[in-house]
Image (cartoon, rainbow, N blue to C red):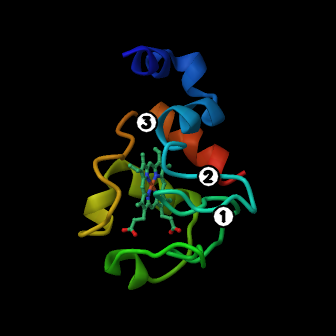
Amino acid sequence: MLTLALLAAPALAQDGRAAFEARCVSCHAADAGAPPGPGPNLAGLAGRRIGGDPRFDYSPALRGAQGAWTAARLSEFLEDPEEMFPGLWMGGNGVRDAAARRAIVDYLMR
Ligand code: HEC
């Protein structure tokens, strides 16, 4: 797939916005004020409570979660989302590739 080929190129993987648009934007907006889609809005995620989009109806897995998002926590989450939150409603949409993951974390924690 073209998207995967692009993400495999290290220079482009640094571009977190492009990686986010390729892999996440089908479900998540990242602009403040945008409505949630199939997934919660991710604007202002740094320091936001986990499961903290008031307009999104979260699964019990995220409704019962404690704490707030940090870069370290987000990176660990994206490496294997279901491992951190068993029963999560996000499909198999983690980011195994470390460079792409770092770029997406930087973009969302900006
Ligand atoms: C197929 C749709 C889909 C895709 C693609 C997807 N997600 Fe999600 N995501 C969700 C859903 C649905 C939830 C809420 C899960 C729940 O309630 O269990 C979620 C939750 C999250 C959360 C927790 C948000 C909060 O408010 O605590 C983060 C962070 C997140 N996704 C990041 C990402 C990133 C980054 C990507 C791209 C690599 C991505 N997601 C791709 C559907 C998706």
Please provide percent x and percent y for residue 100.
Answer: 49, 33
Q: Quadrant of the N terminus?
A: top left
Give the structural element (helix, strand or loop) at label 1.
loop
Which residue corresponds to the image point at 39% horizontal and 33% vertical from the top-left? Answer: 97
Query: Viewed as shown, does residue 62 lie left or right of 83?
Result: right
Q: Residues within 10 Å of mark 2 (few under 14, many from 20)?
A: many
Q: Mark 3 points at which residue?
A: 98
Is 54 placed above or below 31 here? below
Give the structural element (helix, strand or loop) at label 3.
helix
| Nearest to the observer: residue 12 or residue 93 | 93
**Sequence-first disc among 1 and 3:** 1
**Sequence-first disc among 2 and 1:** 2
Q: What residue type is labelled 2?
A: Ala
Residue at mark 1 to residue at mark 3: CA–CA distance: 20 Å
**Sequence-first disc among 3 and 2:** 2
Q: Which amino acid does label 1 sit on?
A: Ala
Query: Viewed as shown, does residue 91 lie left or right of 76?
Result: left
| Mark 1 beta carbon near ligand 1 (under 8 Å) | no
Residue at mark 3 to residue at mark 2: CA–CA distance: 22 Å
Q: What residue type is labelled 3?
A: Ala
Query: Viewed as shown, does residue 2 lie left or right of 22?
Result: left
Give the structural element (helix, strand or loop) at label 2.
loop
Q: Residues within 10 Å of mark 1 (few under 14, many from 20)?
A: some
Please provide percent x and percent y for residue 57.
Answer: 46, 76
Q: Nearer the viewer, mark 3 or mark 2?
A: 2
Q: Residues within 10 Å of mark 3 (few under 14, many from 20)?
A: few
Residue 75 circle label: none
Residue 46 circle label: 1
Q: Name the residue under label 2.
A: 29
| Mark 2 beta carbon near ligand 1 (under 8 Å) | no
